[in-house]
Amino acid sequence: MPTRNELLSASRKELATLMQSGHPIAPGALDETEYRGTSLGLPAWVERLTWKTFRKTFHRDPATGALRGWNVRLLQRGRGGRAEPILRGGVPVTFGHYVVVEERPVEDGPGLLLHYGLGKNGRLDPVRLLRDPLVALEAGSAELLLGFTYLEAGPVRIGTPSFFTLEREGPLTYRPPV
């Protein structure tokens, strides 16, 4: 299994190979967890405009049984330690809600799919077009995950240069109102 540092310096081609050779993720392994995400493969100027690190969460909805999640904006303070969320009105800033889908296109690899079109995003929010295939880098472990992002508009899929890692931080600490 590659280390975090190896992933940070990997080329897009190497990351794509790791996605295809990744391992399935048991959806239950993600229930009620938070992961620290790190963007990979984006040009530095894009990272300066957006972010390098973020949090992805996973929550099993007791009403529907669906595994859903959202992104949390983090203060960009470098590496190490548990990342701090950006707060607005005393609560973490969340965005990009998704539903975890087990059935996905075979070209996405053996893992799960984070489907933003099924999340509770605004009807006109362009984030609804995002899809994130996600694989485990070690068989049977959900500690370090690798994903990438593409846009889906009807039958058209548009790749992005964006890969990301997810490293388990711990149990879910905040659930935004739906």
Image (tube, helix red, strand yellow):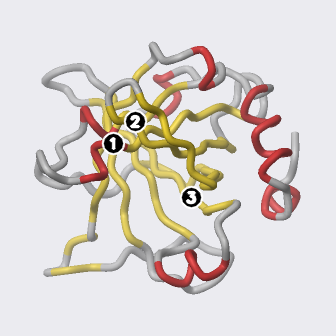
* Amino acid bearing label 1: Leu
List the residue tagged with mark 1: 129
Describe the element under mark 3 as helix, strand or loop.
strand
Describe the element under mark 2 as helix, strand or loop.
strand
The answer to whether residue 54 is above or below residue 62 is below
Neighbor class of circle 1 (other Cα within 10 Å; few <14, some 14-19, many 20+) is: some
Neighbor class of circle 2 (other Cα within 10 Å; few <14, some 14-19, many 20+) is: some
List the residue tagged with mark 3: 37
Real-space Cα distance between discs 1 and 2? 5 Å
* Amino acid bearing label 3: Gly
Q: Are marks 3 and 1 in contact (CB under 8 Å)?
A: no
Real-space Cα distance between discs 2 and 3? 22 Å
Q: Earlier in the sequence, mark 1 or mark 2?
A: 1
- Residue that lies at the very extreme toward the front in this rendered image: 156
Describe the element under mark 1 as helix, strand or loop.
helix
The spot of residue 133 in percent (x, y) is 55, 33
The answer to whether residue 154 is above or below residue 59 is above
Say which mark, if any, is on residue 42: none
Q: Are marks 1 and 2 in contact (CB under 8 Å)?
A: yes
82 left or right of 120 in image: right
The spot of residue 136 in percent (x, y) is 68, 32
List the residue tagged with mark 2: 152
Q: Nearer the viewer, mark 2 or mark 3?
A: 2
The answer to whether residue 139 is above or below residue 127 is above
Where residue 26 sits, quadrant-wise, is top right
* Amino acid bearing label 2: Glu
